[in-house]
Amino acid sequence: MRGKELHKFKWILVLELAFAGAYLALTRGLFVIFLVSVGYRVKGISLVMLASAAMAILMGILIYRFPSFIVRRVKLKLVTFHGLERVMWFFIPFIQDPLTVSILYSLYMIFSFFVSTFMNFVIYGSLSEADVKDVLAKRSASGGASNIVGFLLGAFLLAFIPERNKFVYIFPLGAALGLLSTFLITFLSLSHLENAALPRAVKEPEKVFSSSLFFVILLMGGNLLGMVWIPYVMNKLGGPDYLAALMNLLGTVSSILASLFWGGKSFKALRLGHILNVVNPLMIWLTTNPTVHVAISAFNSFTYTGANFLGSFLFARYKEWFGAVYSSVLLATLGNVAVLMAAPIGIVLREDYSLTFLVTFMVLMTSVLLSLVAVPEVAVVSEDTARTYSFILYRSGVAGYRTTVEISKDTAIATLRLLAMILVFMMLYVIYRLLSILIVR
């Protein structure tokens, strides 16, 4: 694609998330409040998230093993899954049974996984590395701006619609806005992606492995922080409801500015955002004045956006030899892996805020250390040294995965019992093995 065609293609992608941002704010962004309204407690909410993330991960593994599904009838599948994801929100508010809600949300997460995978494939498979960076930055900014509008509209509707009818109106409204973004993508020309070539072998699997490992640990830390921060400010520090809303609002505004700032930066510059992001759990933990957390929220969003771009931009470079299909599936799966890893920690630690912030700090620090020594593009050591560390990590993961498979053939029941007992303490181990399954073919 060149000239006007490329310009049109990129702006459709940007506008798609402009509508989707408001849709997400009015649906998924309010889903936890809806769960509370139908009787869920913290443990139940975490279990819903766990179950839905597990289903999406299962889909990710299957699609990674059978990638031809992604490269056939691309536009039809993208539009279908895109629309089905939004249509789910027309039904969810009318269901009061907790089990049925869980099933519907798990189905939604499966559709959401396919939407993320196909959208990533469209972006990574159609654009150059420079254009990928440009589109991702602009999509992030437009989505953030739209999210603010959706957030304000959602707050207004929650305040003025009668209690019993709130979500019967809000979720369908959000879904309708989401379907506008579905309408937009029907104008994308995707014939060039049909039967796209799949790499026979991964050229540098150790680089994909180390980058995936640092990225999923970063996302895991972000999820942990998101689960505990607002409860800490409101329940522990006594902050009012509007302060929590202001934190979300300022955080979103900051992410828009961050998208414009970090979008054109080099890997070395993005490394700074990744490093600065580590201090956020400590600042949150040590700051006892609730009002100051508004400023911390803005700083956290700014640095986290830079760290997130680091992972996304690395895969924009790897797509040349790793393939747009595998990059797309892996990126979509990593987000769900991060949720799956963070949720059990939240369940176990609950309101032990000090320990949760300490664990989050250690998780984010691990992510930074991995990137600084094992990801050649951002490492502070020489490229050869970084490649060596990356290869050691990769070989350790492969060997451990194969050993686990052999052992599990004879000791399946014992292994399951052990995993149930030590799940929280073996999080990094589980991530290792799962990434091995995804990358080793």
Image (cartoon, rainbow, N blue to C red):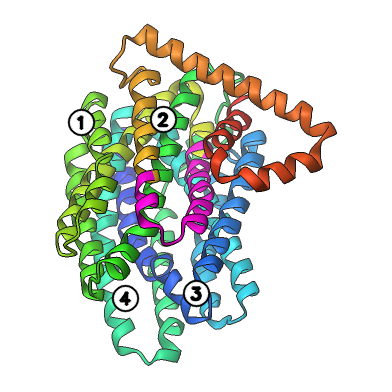
Q: Mark 3 points at which residue?
A: 35
- Judged left or right of residue 275, residue 162 is right
How far separated are the C-alphas under marks 4 and 1? 34 Å
Asked where in the image residue 370 lies, by quadrant, the reply is: top left
Tell me which numbered mark, 3 or 2, is placed earlier along the sequence.
3
Q: Residue at x 44, y 60 (%)?
A: 182
How far separated are the C-alphas under marks 4 and 2? 34 Å
Disc assigned to residue 265: 1
Give the x, y percent position of residue 177.
Answer: 37, 69
Asked where in the image residue 272 lies, by quadrant, the reply is: top left
Mark 3 vs 2: CB contact within 8 A: no
Give the x, y percent position of residue 43.
Answer: 54, 66
The magenta stretch is: 329-358
**SS type, badge 3:** helix
Give the x, y percent position of residue 240.
Answer: 23, 75
- Judged left or right of residue 210, residue 108 is right
Q: Which residue is drawn at 34% across and 42% down?
A: 361
Tell me which numbered mark, 1 or 2, is placed earlier along the sequence.
1
Q: What residue type is labelled 1?
A: Lys
Q: Which residue is drawn at 74% across and 29% down?
A: 405
Q: Does the magenta stretch include residue 437?
A: no
Tell me which numbered mark, 4 or 1, is placed earlier along the sequence.
4
**SS type, badge 2:** helix
How far separated are the C-alphas under marks 4 and 3? 16 Å
Mark 1 vs 3: CB contact within 8 A: no
Q: Mark 4 points at which residue?
A: 154
Front tag of 1 and 3: 3
